[in-house]
Amino acid sequence: MSQAENPSPFTLANEAAQAIGSITGVEKHDIALTLGSGWGKAADLLGEVIADIPASEIPGFESSGVPGHSGTLRSIALPGGKHALVIGARTHFYENKGVRAVVHSVRTAAAAGAKTMVLTNGAGGIKDSWKPGTPVLLSDHINLTASSPLEGATFVDLTDLYSPRLRGVAKDIDPSLDEGVYVQFRGPHYETPAEVQMAKSFGGHIVGMSTALEAIAAREAGMEILGLSLITNLAAGISAHPLSHQEVIDAGKEAEPVISALLARIVHAL
Ligand code: HPA
């Protein structure tokens, strides 16, 4: 079946949200978080776990094929009385499942009532002052996937896509947080040093393989977006040595306790 013949992605997202509502008994989730490499422990620090649902039990989700992604959706009661939906099952554009699959989690979060979308990832740093393990706020993005989650003549403004208000909240918690422009490449190969230099010359500071498409879908859904990258490595050619996925996983594991605690404090302040 071609993408055009499938049921509307919004219908599928509504079905997913209904399934989450009936499994959790939570009528409305206020905040949604997608936890990328290195951020997973935040799910344990946010509040009282109401339900941990294997992604495969929710319409439109599959368990993640990527090590470092948990493959569950977790409903959490936050201390202030709000509810968070933590998505540990991200579909990447490079998996070739189509852009609808990539943004299904975001559309599900919106259908579940979330007005705030926190998108996190592990990424390569172009600024050489960022050591592996540094968390960075996204200030904007450059989408190099040559794709969009928007279908038809859906003209959506992307000015201030990454909410200045939410970035302010994060900086109140940790004034040392730096900001940068995220450049989404298709992957799954890492960038060449020449591509990293291109991204730098375009105004990019961070290179990765997720988030930008999800942020566009979140904006379409009217959500306020906070983006955070964990710099797991210096981008290709910025560092003297070649990249490895193991290095990315290891840097994520090492930074996880600190950045997860930071993220939990930020979420509690939203
Ligand atoms: N490039 C793209 N994606 C990544 C990187 C990188 O250097 N590190 C972790 N994810």
Image: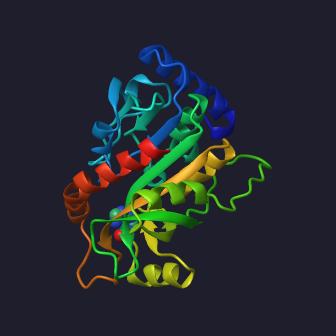
Residue 46 percent coordinates (x, y): 35, 38
Q: Residue at x 68, y 46 (%)?
A: 220
In the figure, 196 relative to 79: above or below?
below
Q: Residue at x 59, y 60 (%)?
A: 164
Q: Quadrant of residue 113?
A: top right
153 and 127: which is toward the camera:
127
172 and 20: which is toward the camera:
172
In the figure, 61 relative to 37: above or below?
above
Residue 143 percent coordinates (x, y): 58, 64
Q: Residue furthest right?
A: 153
Q: Quadrant of residue 231?
A: bottom left
Which quarter of the rendered picture does the N terminus lie within? top right
112 and 155: which is toward the camera:
112
Q: Residue at x 25, y 55 (%)?
A: 258
Residue 131 percent coordinates (x, y): 28, 74
243 and 259: which is toward the camera:
259
